[in-house]
Amino acid sequence: MRKIWLNPGFWLVLAIVVALGAWPIFQQDAAARETGFTVLLAIVMASSLNIVMGYTGYVSFGHVVFYGIGGYIGMYFIDSLGLPLPVAVLFGGLSSALLAFLLGKAILRLRGAYFALATIGVNEAARTFVANFQPFGAATGIELQFSVYKAYGGALQALWLVYYGVVGIAIFSVIFSYYIKTSKFGLGLMTIREDEDAAEVIGIVTPNAKTWAYVLSAILPGMLGVLFFFKNGNVEPGDAFRLGFSIESLVMIMLGGQGTVLGPVLGALGYQRLRGTLLTSDLMIGSLPLKDFQLVISGFLMLLIILFIPSGLVGWLRQRFATLRRVLA
Amino acid sequence: MTLILQVQAVTKRFGGLQALTKVTFDLAQGQVLGLIGPNGAGKTTLFNVINGVYTPEEGRILFLGKDVTGKKSYELAKMGMARTHQIVRPLKELTVRENVIVGACYGHENHDLISAAKIADEVLSFVGISARADQLAGSLNVAQKKRLEMARALAARPKLLLLDEVLAGLTPSEIDGMVKTVLSIRDQGVSIVMIEHVMKAIMNVSDRLFVLDYGQQIAEGGPEEVVHNPKVIEAYLGDPQMAQKLMEEG
Amino acid sequence: MNFSNLLTSLVDGLLIGVVYGIAAMGLNLIWGVMRVINLAHGVIIALGMFGVYLFFSTLGLNPYLALLLVAVLGLLLGVLIYFIVIARVINAPYLSTLLATFSINMIILGLGTAAFTTTPRDSGFSLGNVDLGPLTLQGTRLVAALVTILVTGALYYFLYRTRPGKYIRAVANNRAAAELMGIPSDRILALSFGIGTMLAAIAGGLIATFFSFTILSGDIYQQKSFVIGVLGGLGNPLGALLGGLILGVLEGILPLAMPNTWVPVIEFLLFIIILLVKPSGLLGGRQ
């Protein structure tokens, strides 16, 4: 176990995220910034879900719940209590962590597909509950007054401010992901992934380790939720708890390679670029525009990956070229 | 003489099946107890009960003089118990060294990664698979996996080691090597309970033998005494090959 | 609230519940036989809806005749999906099967959206109302429930009285042992998957006779299938009918006591609680 800063793999993944984040800032271009938002959000969601799915081996379809709950709590604090954004972001992260702790105690006892099913239930229960919950605006959600942005130098300034926040969280997320992977705690998680019963016999306190993995994976999505809904000016149950978003995060991890640090980053980047390209393409298939087939093409690609390279891009490279193991973390 | 493990009238049922009936034995510090019996006698179940995988319906288990009945496997590991599995359970996607580091990290000595890595290298050379340290555990052959399983348990520097058929499936020369390894573990002061079918080996290694049949203990004592016990021979008659072996080797 | 209202809600709930029940039965059969959670279940339900709708509105076929065609097509589609995709991942970690079926879902959903858009459709089919004492029931719902019971009976007969059905149960019980006995497990698995998707298509076709829908509607019914499946015991096809009845009753009765929008909250909480407390379902034995 070498020191993090001596490992080229760490610098590679960090450099990719820093470059992605910095590009729109140098360009000072709104379109580049919006692309940056989408890609960085995807990176954080995939990297954090990877702690539970890739390191620990628990497939969650409910990762977006942490994004949604964090976002709602943060928006509530800003809208109803008038708290400043950074405090709201902090509370968003903390409340997601708390939710993960309580949920983890309950549903992490389930294994395999039963856990996966339970997380779908949690996602839907959260969405339908919030849609009825009056303090959070029930079905219509929470909408911010335009005047809120004045405190941050106007809407435009606020957008850039949020962007810096997102870049910071994205950079932190890969450092965090790398740190966990190379720590003793991370080794314990990977032992659970490989064989949970053996892990208990070896002496890993599996209920605690799993719960902490779940909590650690929940914090950053919770913080991001606040930033994104603040940027949008409103939050609704359908956006906050979109099951498809959780599944997209799973797909990104699969694309890049689960259990690796670089995989979710590359997977998120690749998936979002592909989606962006398809959605803005002018090509026509017969009388229909290509963008109508975005879902079909994404589904087809994903199927090919699952059938033929289930370990993802990074996993495949690592298997194929053993020397790359040192570089591709 | 201090007792490291005391199993007192332990009974375990699965539905209507009585897997263990009032099993009782003691193990003294630094001794090797051989646990034998026909297939399905309840040997592995007994390990699972001692090890906290199952909770017995009746009876008590004392480890280091403390009642540990119903404690979880990881609590027992933290107290200094380690085991190997009959069907090896390598952590396939981790390297051999990482497999052993896990053992050292999460055992009762609770090492950090750096000191665990040192212990792992020592243990790997002790069991003779140092050359494989950087390979993925899934790529090892059966004999190497058995050694890895043993190394992972040893890396915890246990006070009590439960070995479940570490010799099964090995060639005669591999068995000799493994027997030497077990003896040198005992010489380091580790107490061992060992399930084994290879009679010659277990007779050489064990201080005492304990025989289970249909979940009942049918004999206990020195190796020579036990294999000539008529009840033991009768139990094995259900398994003619085994009985034959007993006759020849005893 | 008067007694007749309560009774109507209750019976309406029961009638719809059994239809949900056969969708869940398909999901449960697939899980029970091959330990695959089919995330393309919902979209196949939606295809069933479109099948009946299109045969009826463009060819003027009687919806129940159309249902027969839809059932056959559903079976074939399932067998096809099995051989192209599922057979390749059936022994892989469960994540692979989850994501593989989800990608099938994406592909069908994408094609369906391109072909049908997401404008709501309504078959406009009606059998009038049936008056039974204090009750007034929609004819289509009544027939749908009857069809469901027939299909369940047929499935039961198939699984317990015919050779392929017994093979399916043998493979569900222990695939390796069944293979050793000479049962062609690949074909049996394909058949099971086909029957599972057939049941989904039938459920969709029946729902299309009384509810409006879009290609996206399948999602809601897939989630109901999960809830029902867990209520009745995952892997227990016949338990699904009971699960469907329970869900139907809840959906019939709960809106009388609380706003409609709270009903799914209760359903999903129930789902999680049963998974935690008794994952083998209300009818199931020890876990």
Image: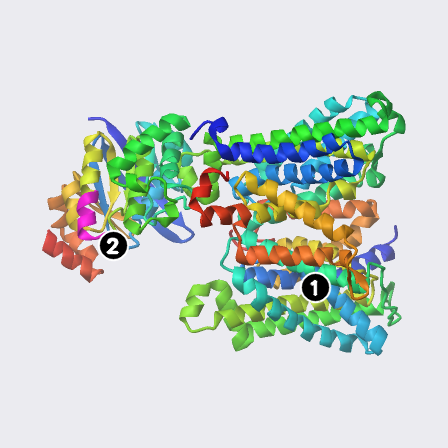
Residue in the picture at 73% in, 34% down? A24
Helix, strand or loop for disc 1: helix
Mark 2: amino acid = Pro
- The image position of residue C217, as x and y in percent, is 77, 58
Lateral position of residue A168 relative to residue B109, left or right: right
Nearest the eye: A271 or C267:
A271
Answer few, some or many: residues within 10 Å of disc 2's Cα (few below 14, many 20 plus, some between 14 and 19).
Answer: many
- The image position of residue B147, as x and y in percent, is 28, 43
Helix, strand or loop for disc 2: loop
Q: Which mark is residue A154?
A: none
Q: State the residue position of label 2.
A: B38
Q: Residue A301: within the magenta? A: no
Mark 1: amino acid = Ile
Which quadrant is home to the N terminus of chain A? top left
Q: State the residue position of label 1.
A: C44
Nearest the eye: B32 or B129:
B129
Q: CA distance from mark 2 to mark 1?
A: 53 Å
- Which span of residues is magenta-colored? B169-178
The nearer-to-camera label among 2 and 1 is 1
